[in-house]
């Protein structure tokens, strides 16, 4: 991205502060800057036919005439892809809430910054900008429309395979486990993720078809690595309905016996909303799994409506913190506070913590400083087929 080629709009009611922001942009190398003293003037610069179009807008939260909140809503209604930076004299908590609101509206939110604005901080937010064409190409491709019958046929043809993402102990850098992610090697569309098949399985209440296929193949992969001298643990995602099936205990015992794997090498992951229940039968199932040596992990923690009393009763061994509380936590005070709270909860309950979605070295370093147990994410590795893991592991061990 060449910042000199971008068109900036500075919307600020105070003339002195407006000019100061423009001066910062000039110092950063910006070539074209338009200034607006109020919200209505700013909105006119986003109208169709106005050229050159605005690429990045720096908007004061207390903008006169039409404040930043209304302007953001108007931009969302117009489906604008302009990058937005909000500045304000409000608290970090308020600025964070503005970011959350803008993201919910679908705005290309680059961040919020308190006053007085510091050039280096503004520069780091501008660096988050992607041109609309780049943003679209960087986004996920739309999943093809696939029927339940096609998914069923794919399962029968054994086209579904588990991919595995390493889980790293932050204190030592050692690889402590692998988490399973279901992938469909589709004969026409290539490798497809869950967005292509999970919804139709849920709609037809047959997630168990996929679960058992992934359990069997994951345990087999565990045996493959153990035979290569890599005695690593595996985490497998299972739906609540699969785990609650009357024959689950017998079937999983038979599966482990076939592949000669001990239960303590297997952790079952379930979403927060699935495990927070008062159903005694389901709680009994969780207890039996833990008593036999299986690990239990609460996935996507923080996205449900947690009942701490219920959470304390669940015999889980790991608390997996959702990526929304990990990504950017080192830069955003409010997110960092929530992350610290989650880690403190895990420690107080004597559970291991796993931070999901570690995308940058900043995320990694921040989590190390907070005492998080494990980390996983694209900064470490993308999910991979089991046959690729030994070579990746050798490279990782050499690095550390």
Image: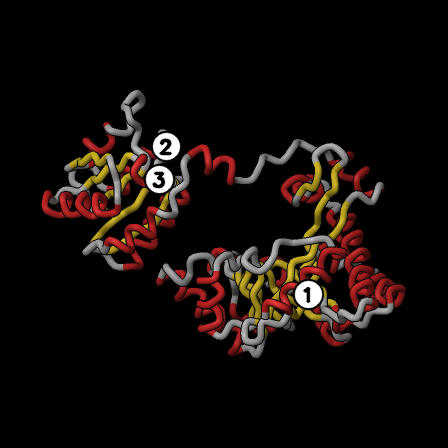
Q: Which residue lies furthest to the left in this view?
A: 16
Disc number for residue 260: none
Which of the two labelled residues, at mark 2 and mark 1, occupies the earlier sequence position? 2
Foreground residue among 320 and 159? 159
Q: Is mark 1 on a helix, strand or loop?
A: helix
Tell whether 168 sits left or right of 5.
right
Q: Is mark 3 on a helix, strand or loop?
A: loop
**Residue at 30% across, 20% down:** 49
Q: Name the residue under label 1.
A: 394
Tell whether 310 sits left or right of 2.
right
Which of the two labelled residues, at mark 2 and mark 3, occupies the earlier sequence position? 3
Q: What element carries label 2?
A: loop
Q: Residues within 10 Å of mark 2 (few under 14, many from 20)?
A: some
Foreground residue among 88 and 65? 88
Percent from the top left, x then y, of residue 174? 62, 72
Can residue 203 be seen from the camera position used here? Answer: no
Tell whether 272 sits left or right of 234.
left
- The image quadrant where one finds the N terminus is top left
Which of the two labelled residues, at mark 3 and mark 1, occupies the earlier sequence position? 3
Q: Residues within 10 Å of mark 3 (few under 14, many from 20)?
A: few
**Residue at 51% across, 36% down:** 137
Percent from the top left, x then y, of residue 80? 36, 32
Q: Name the residue under label 2.
A: 80
Q: Residue furthest right?
A: 258
Q: Disc 2 and disc 3: Cα gap in Å?
A: 21 Å
Vertical side of 150 occupied by 332: above or below: below
**Residue at 52% across, 69% down:** 308
- The image quadrant where one finds the C terminus is bottom right
Foreground residue among 309 and 262? 262
Q: Name the residue under label 3.
A: 2
């Amino acid at each position: 991205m060449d910042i000199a080629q971008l068109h900036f709009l500075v919307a600020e009611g105070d003339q002195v502060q407006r000019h100061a922001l423009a001066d910062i942009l000039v110092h950063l190398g910006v070539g074209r800057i338009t200034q607006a003293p109020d919200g209505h003037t700013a909105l006119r610069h986003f109208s169709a036919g106005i050229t050159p179009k605005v690429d990045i807008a720096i908007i004061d939260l207390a903008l006169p005439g039409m404040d930043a909140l209304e302007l953001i809503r108007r931009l969302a209604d117009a489906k604008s892809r302009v990058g937005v930076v909000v500045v304000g004299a409000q608290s970090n908590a308020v600025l964070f809430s503005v970011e959350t609101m803008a993201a919910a509206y679908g705005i290309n939110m680059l961040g919020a910054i308190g006053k007085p604005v510091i050039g280096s901080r503004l520069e780091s937010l501008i660096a988050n900008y992607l041109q609309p064409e780049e943003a679209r190409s960087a986004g996920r491709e739309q999943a093809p429309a696939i029927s339940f019958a096609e998914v069923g046929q794919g399962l029968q043809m054994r086209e579904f395979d588990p991919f595995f993402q390493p889980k790293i102990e932050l204190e030592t850098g050692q690889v402590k486990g692998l988490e399973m992610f279901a992938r469909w090697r589709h004969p026409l569309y290539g490798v497809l993720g869950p967005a292509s098949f999970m919804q139709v399985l849920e709609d037809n209440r047959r997630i168990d078809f996929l679960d058992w296929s992934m359990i069997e193949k994951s345990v087999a992969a565990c045996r493959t690595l153990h035979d290569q001298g890599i005695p690593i643990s595996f985490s497998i995602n299972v739906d609540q309905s699969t785990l609650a099936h009357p024959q689950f205990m017998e079937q999983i015992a038979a599966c482990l016996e076939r592949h000669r794997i001990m239960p303590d090498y297997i952790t079952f992951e379930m979403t927060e909303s699935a495990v927070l229940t008062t159903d005694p039968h389901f709680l009994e199932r969780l207890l039996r799994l833990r008593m036999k040596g299986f690990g239990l992990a609460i996935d996507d923690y923080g996205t449900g409506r947690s009942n701490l009393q219920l959470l304390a009763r669940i015999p889980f061994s790991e608390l997996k913190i959702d990526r929304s509380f990990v990504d950017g936590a080192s830069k955003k005070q409010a997110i960092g506070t929530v992350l610290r709270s989650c880690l403190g909860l895990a420690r107080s309950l004597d559970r291991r913590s796993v931070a999901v979605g570690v995308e940058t070295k900043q995320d990694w370093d921040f989590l190390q400083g907070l005492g998080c147990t494990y980390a996983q994410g694209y900064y470490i590795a993308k999910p991979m087929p089991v046959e690729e893991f030994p070579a990746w592991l050798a490279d990782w061990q050499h690095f550390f």
